[in-house]
Amino acid sequence: MKKTLFFLLFSIGLTAFGQYIDPLEAVDPNIGTVHSRWFFYTPAANPFGMAKPAPSTNGSYGNEWGWEAVGYDGTHTSIEGFVNFHEFQVGGISLMPTNGELITIPGKLENVEEGYRSTFQKENEMAQPGYYSVLLDDYNIKAELTSTPRVSFHKYTYPKGENHLIFDIGNTQGESGPVVDAAVSMIDDHTIEGYVITHPGYVKYYQPGAYVKMYFVAKLDKTTNSILSFNKEDVHFGSKTALGKGAGLALTFKGDEAYQVEVKIGQSYTSIENARLNLKEEANDLTFDQAKEKAQNKWREMLGKIAVKGGSKEHQTKFYTGLYHALLGRGLSSDVNGQYPSITGEVGQIAIDSLTNQPKYNHYNTDAVWGAFWNLTQLWALAYPEYYNEFVQCQLDIYKDGGWLADGVATNKFVSGVGTNYTGLLIASAFNRGIDQYDHEVAYQAVRKNELGWMNRPLGAGKADTKVFVEEGFVPLTQNNEYYSASNAEGSQFSASHTLEYSFSTNAAMQMAKKLHHNDDAKMFAAYGKGWEKLFDEETGFIRPKTTDGQFVKDFDPKKVWTGFQEGNAWQYTFYVPHDVEGLSQKIGPKEFVDRLDGVFETAAITKFGGGEKVDAFAGLQNVYNHGNQPSLHISWMYNFTDQPHKTQYWVREICDVFYGTDETHGYGYGQDEDQGQLGAWYVLAGIGLFDVAGGTLENPTLQLSLPQFDEVKITLDQQFYEGESFVIKTKGDPTKNRYIKSSAWNGQSLDKVFLPWSEYVKGGVLEMKSSAKPTK
């Protein structure tokens, strides 16, 4: 007791005297849960974990196109189960504790009594990184969740008497799509195992004939009194096995006093055997409380790689909640023995390290990486280069197994989010910044093929219009009604935005080619990198789509969405030349460039930099700026390339204070798509005042500066990749009240620009900034 009291007082003292805050205490997982996507709310998970147990309020509803908000919504008042797989296009294996009449369907939100779902009160819910609990009102049962990387832990505290535990295996969950097959069986008094195979919408379109497979082995610490199987409402008393759609088991327990049941669920995408192995290796001797402690320690470690002092409580909460989401998404897909689901449908094997006898790296699921270079990969490069390196290695295995890089993968099945493919750029950028522990030549050939390859290119590799871009240097506008890609070899409905994207990514490939001495390729890629110029309309000053005859489209409206531009318009996309900001500024005119930026942000402020208070993922697409979607995320930083960098400092802080919120509805805009950590990662970069418009792709990458929100920031550098031990930013003055940089110095040397070379960052050191309430012009 004395030791505990001492530690508590010591911790309070550290905070009181301006030490680094406890990041775990600053995270609020419930922020932004209204109209959130399937993978958004999984507080009990580990960073980048496979096991993501979480409450579901409407996951059984599924969704029409595979991406709409579903799963857990902050406005809902009943829970239908606790689901263990949560990724883009991946969902399954639900548990639900009940008592009273046994019901085997979840029911609907508007009619709780028809199913096994239960009402709950927000005041009886707790969510922290690595832990979740809630009291189910209808049953007086407390549910608790935690995890190891590949094992979900459930603990249910039942009232005395007869209670049930439902294993709902063969039904749709979130983005899973329809169930194709399922099986669940109790193989001994304490073990249940099974699988579910689903057909998500994106997999169905991008990789026909492929499916997502999820396997599990569950260990219970209490013997059941009776068991039955079911397929939806068709019940089989005494049966220990259920097969096919709707398959599930219902266990019944009895006790004269209140009692607890703990369940450990080993998970895998390859086999029941590997699910059992994952359970054994990670959790065989762990109790629930031990697993919780390990999970929360891991969260403290990972969040603490970017430590902060000072700043307002609101900024601290937004900052660490954003970082939490950036570390939560894109979870493990490989097993402890290095086996992974190959894109071919077989089981692949990661090389084993001869010294540690462990896999040399891991594989991960991922939503599309569209726009990730303005948030996630910059964050990974700054503080988590080991994960970034693993991400590249995973992608190179996909390339070696299937012949192409993947934009997004669900258990290594193609799920290209928007029909493009930025993975080549992400690899080139990693290589460019020294994150390069993989075969360089294999990586380059993968990047090269991603940018130029069009023959026999599968839909899932994205960029269906690569052929015409390679031949013409731009993509012409064509009418294409394909819901997911809207592109083919002749052109695209999103022609202008694709031209801009391909110009950017080929320029990144050019830098990699130069460094690896592929000089002819470098010249070719350099020419493609100027493709954006072919669509710049001198008359209007906008990027403007061209038709197949090479003429600009008629009746051009720069605010029009979807015609030539994906999820945006010409106002937003004209700034989409991150690799040549100076060239774009000269095209528009330097003064007009600044004036246009001014007009954009003054106008955007009216709608809170998104869609106002409209709760919708696509709110704001038609506006001149939309922070709720990827194409705009770099624009506020472009003032740094003009003679008015103080306006970056103003508008970046304004976006942080207005677009981002701290409640369930106003979190990442109002119900806008947080995209597996992308909007959260952007806030983190803004909060520490470091950003690169070009996403690390230029020959000599830089970090552009803004004023941090904190008195001090300390980033622990990974010395597997970087020379230095830490990068520290110290801010003099009040960084909450002040927005502007009065002066700055790097390791004691004055900086006369708002640029810090990446080559200096990796050496480590101290960046000192003096803040000001007034701009320094």
Image: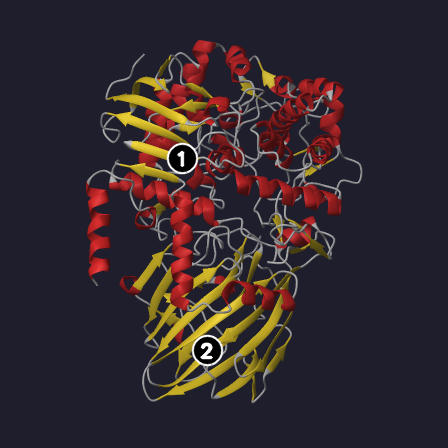
Callout 1–callout 2 Cβ contact below 8 Å: no
Neighbor class of circle 1 (other Cα within 10 Å; few <14, some 14-19, many 20+) is many
Farthest residue to the front: give it.
355
Front in this rendered view, residue 114 or 184 = 184
Quadrant the C terminus occupies: top left
Residue 369: mark in rendering: none
The residue depicted at 61 percent of the width and 58 percent of the height is 335
Q: Is residue 193 left or right of residue 688?
A: right
Q: Is residue 186 left or right of residue 342?
A: left
- Residue 671 visible in this rendered orientation of the protein: no
Residue 599 locus on image (x, y percent):
39, 21
For label 1, the SS is strand
Neighbor class of circle 2 (other Cα within 10 Å; few <14, some 14-19, many 20+) is few
Residue 691 locus on image (x, y percent):
44, 28
Does 431 appear above or below 268?
above
Quadrant the N terminus occupies: bottom left
Does 510 appear above or below 672?
above
Q: Amino acid at mark 1?
A: Ile
Q: Which residue is mark 2?
A: 221
Earlier in the chain: of badge 1 and badge 2, it is 2
- Residue 216 visible in this rendered orientation of the protein: yes
Q: Which residue is mark 1?
A: 715
- Based on the displayed image, in which of its 4 quarters is residue 448 positioned? top right
Distance from Cα at disc 1 to Cα at disc 2? 42 Å
